Image (spheres, grey):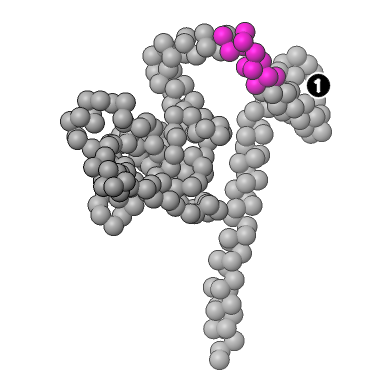
Amino acid sequence: MNPHDGFLHWLRSRLPAGLLVIVPVFVTLWLTSFFYIKMTEWAVQAVHLLAPSAAPVFWVEQSIRIITLLAIIIMLALTGEFAHYKLGRYLIRIAEWIMLKLPLLGTIYSTTRQIGEALWTPQGGMFRKVVLIEYPRKGIYAVGFVTRESKQDKEVASKAGRDLISVFLPTTPNPTSGFLLFVPRDDCIFLQMKVADGMRLVISGGAVTIQKDEVTVPPPEIKPEENNSINT
């Protein structure tokens, strides 16, 4: 075997393995550094404006950034604590009402809040359950989110003549857009994963591994006449 060919074979086999190790670490460090600088740059600039004669020192700037980051974390924690009180919830509702009334900003705020609730709240916000539906054709499955049990939509249920579920089918990797589908309950495969895990699965394009991969199919509903025959 030619030593040159052996080296190329070794390089082709080891290079992807090295990339799989280095690239996630690099991306994580780069994103952390990016947000760290962006979130604290205003504090460094403010100090420079207040003391323009002071020479920029690396450790002084880093101290300002760390203090600013800690202040932001504490402020977020206090805001969450304030939201637990009746007065805090009242003021937050007023602020949300004002934001939703503003053109364009209201749409951005509403969408951002719904995504945040789906990712970080245990209830999943407006999304209740994660389901698999056959879309866009039989044999191909897509991840959707149950937004409402359509039994309350009397017109939709009566016109269709079936028990339908409102399912939001998001696009990848941007879940802010998607389709509203009314899917028969029998055609939905209910997943055990949390809504946040389902949203991460959509955003990552399927690259994120979900630990809970068990699925459950809802039991078929027994019609009244079938129930009577069973009892007899």
Q: Nearer the viewer, residue 38 or 154?
A: 154
Q: Which residue is mark 1?
A: 54
Q: Main secondary structure of the magenta part?
A: helix
Query: x and y percent of residue 144 in the render?
Result: 38, 42
Callout 1, which amino acid?
A: Ala
The quarter of the displayed image where residue 78 is located: top right
Point out residue 123 in the picture as x, y percentages from the top left corner.
52, 32
Q: Position of residue 12 (x, y in %)?
A: 54, 73
Q: Residue at x 28, y 36 (%)?
A: 164
**What SS does tag 1 mark?**
loop
Is residue 72 positioned above or below 13 on the image? above
Residue 220 falls left or right of residue 124: left
Nearer to the camera, 25 or 154: 154
Q: Is 85 within the magenta? A: yes
Q: Is residue 37 magenta?
A: no
Magenta range is 78-90
Q: Nearer the viewer, residue 219 or 106?
A: 219
